[in-house]
Image: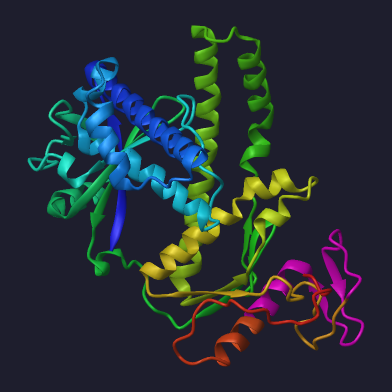
Amino acid sequence: MLRGIKIRLYPNRAQTEEFNKILGCYRFVYNRMLSLKQRAYEESKTNLSMCDLSKYFHNELLKDPEYDWLAEQNTKVMKQSIRQMLTAYDNFFHRRTKFPKFKSKKDYQTALFPCEAISKRNTFETRHIMLTKSLGRIAFRCSDLYLDRLRRLKDNIKSATLSKTKSGNWFLSVLVDIPDHELVRFNHTGGHIGIDLGVKDFAVTSNGEVFSNPKWFRESEKRIAKLQKQVARKTKGSHNRDKARVKLAKVYEKLTRQREAYIHMVVDSLLRDNDIVFTEDLNVQGMLRNHKLAKDIADVGFHKFMNVLEDKARMNYKKVVKVDRWYASSKMCHECGYVYKSLTLSEREWRCPVCGTHHDRDLNAARNILSEGERIIGSRTAEYTLAEKPTVDDRTLCS
């Protein structure tokens, strides 16, 4: 299975300068090809292919005396920017992303090194890596597990993506073909569990376990506001403004690390004891339109959580089954099936008027999700897949 091994790079001054040149040239080629493709379509309705753009790159762009600095770079790396631009077009036409936009120096910057542009002499014994001829012996740091995999599977390296964060840190994501059995971390237990995701608590499981919402952004909100004011008050283009911008970027990057670490902890806890995890098919984009809760919903990271959960479940041969978002998980009594249609978001507890059961809103929802998920997989063959169809016809019954 192809997996990325992310390592932190510590380049010296000369290597940093070379990295910046590569990113600048990579960005220039991407923007030039994007402009060329757009202009060709506007003027003659011509759709330039990879072959057309490659001919322009080799026969015109590289031979132009005005851009002689471009010839200093590895052409195999530069051509990856053309492929990346065409991939952005494909994603747009398949409605996966927005229309491709021009890259900016202020954005998160990356450059892809194909297998041919990575030195075959890498052993990783001294925690150094070699890329192109001009980029030798770059110091790096990673976990012992990642280092062991790099040493053993160095012949399985497929590509490497160089990235520079807004705070100026350098990373390299090495794509390696790792045997499937090495990625399995959790044994099969036969357990099933339902989870209800929320803002008050990050997740509540059907067995009563509660994962609290750390609210990382709320804790740092005042500091972020202060740093944003400092950036706004500095003169544009000044060194002081750049230093203030880096301070702000470091706070945001710390938030990202905290959120991702917590999400991985929750996912590991769920998959360690369960083979099937049932959850709602949340419409995160729709939830973000609620201006009163948008900030808290974005801070929780539901989308990232679902991606990590599905990815780790797939690696460990486990399943994530999604219950339809219109299923009345919070409003339905898990004991007798009564639906409390007038339940409001502020009501965290309620008592069923039919059977008298007292419900915690989130725990009741998690138990209903578990029951509905087991009903879904029970109505299918043994080789079930993720839930794709609605399970309730009455679309007015929202959880």
Q: Could one spot residue 234 in this view of the protein?
A: yes
**Quadrant including the N terminus:** bottom left
Q: Can you tell which quarter of the image residue 127 is in?
A: top left
Q: Nearer the viewer, residue 373 or 387?
A: 387
Q: Can you tell which quarter of the image residue 315 is in?
A: bottom left
On screen, residue 267 above or below 18: below
**Quadrant including the C terminus:** bottom right
Residue 233 location (% of width, % of height): 65, 10
Verify whether residue 253 appears in magenta.
Answer: no
Q: Nearer the viewer, residue 353 or 196?
A: 196
Residue 218 location (% of width, % of height): 68, 38
Residue 57 location (% of width, % of height): 28, 33
Image point (22%, 65%), residue name: 179
Apparent side of residue 392 relative to residue 150 in the rendered image (left or right): right
* The magenta segment: 341-370
The residue at the far front in this view is 44
**Which scheme is used to colour this image of the protein?**
rainbow
Q: In this figure, what is the number of numbered marks?
A: 0
On screen, residue 355 above or below 262: below
On screen, residue 326 above or below 47: below
Apparent side of residue 109 relative to residue 115 in the rendered image (left or right): right
The residue at the far left in this view is 121
Residue 25 location (% of width, % of height): 32, 26
Image point (7%, 40%), residue name: 121
Image point (17%, 55%), residue name: 156
Q: Nearer the viewer, residue 273 or 383?
A: 383
Q: Can you tell which quarter of the image residue 346 is in?
A: bottom right
Q: Could one spot residue 214 in this view of the protein?
A: no
